[in-house]
Image (tube, helix red, strand yellow):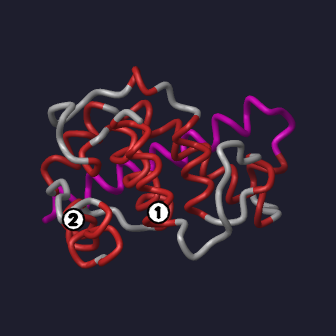
Amino acid sequence: MNAEDTAVKTFQEVWLWPARPVTSEISASLVPTLAEAVLVAVRTIPKESLQRVAPQEAGVAYQPSMLLALLTYCYASGLYASEDIEQRMCQDADFCRVCADEFPGALMLQRFRRLNRDALIRSLAHVLGSQQEQQGATCATTSLPDQDATERSLLDQARQRIRTAIQFDLND
C-alpha cells in the first residue's frame, strides 16, 4: 500500500470509525455522513494532480490526499482557521494515534491550500453538493434549471469557504 492509499485509509480510521464500515465503492447518492462525503470527494481528485508540501516519505498526515481530506472536512464543517485545525488535530486522540503524533502545522496547511486550491475547491463543492442532496435542500441551487448552474453555484460556495479560511488566517 503506497503512502496516498495509507492516507485515505487513515482518514477512514480517524473520522469514520463510529460510522458504518466503508467499502471502496461508496455511492455518492447514499452518503450518510460528512466524513464519507469527504472520502468520496477526495477519491474524485486524481492523486497526481495534488502538489506535495512535504517529502513523499513523510508521515501519513502529510500526504496530499490526507491534507485534502482534512481541509475539505474542516471547511465543510465550518472550521476555517489553520491554527484551530492544527489544535484540533493535536487534541484528537484517534488522529494522534493513527498518525503517530505527527501532524502538519498551520503554515503547512496554508501552503497546501495555496498549492492545491483548485483540487480543494472541487472536493469541497462535491461535499457541499452531497450535503444539499442529503438534506433535501430547497435552497437556490436545487431550483436552478440546469446541472451547469448548480455546479457553478456549488463551486462558488466552495470558493467562498476557502476565502473565509484565508481571511481567518490573515486575522490570526
Q: Which mark is residue 86?
A: 2
Residue at figure coordinates x 53%, y 70% from the top left: 17
Foreground of the two, 64 or 74:
64
Tell whether 136 sits left or right of 114: right
Amino acid type assigned to the residue bearing label 1 in the image: Glu
* Dot 2 crowding, Cα within 10 Å, few <14, some 14–19, many 20+: some
Foreground of the two, 7 or 34:
7
**Location of residue 127 in the rendering, given as x and y in whole percent from the top left corner:** 60, 51
Which residue has dot 1 on it?
13
Badge nearest the viewer, 1 or 2: 1
Quadrant of image for the N terminus: top left
Amino acid type assigned to the residue bearing label 2 in the image: Glu
**Location of residue 8 in the rendering, given as x and y in whole percent from the top left corner:** 46, 46
Q: Which of pointers 1 and 2 lies earlier in the amino acid sequence?
A: 1
Residue at figure coordinates x 16%, y 47% from the top left: 108
Name the element at disc 1: helix
Residue 134 shown in magenta: no
Q: Is residue 23 above or below residue 44?
A: below
Farthest residue, direction top:
48
| Residue 16 lies in quadrant | bottom right
Q: How many marks?
A: 2
Name the element at disc 2: helix
**Location of residue 74 in the rendering, given as x and y in whole percent from the top left corner:** 41, 61
| Residue 35 lies in quadrant | bottom right
* Dot 1 crowding, Cα within 10 Å, few <14, some 14–19, many 20+: some
Tell whether 160 sits left or right of 167: right
Looking at the rendering, the stretch of residues picked out in magenta corresponds to 144-172
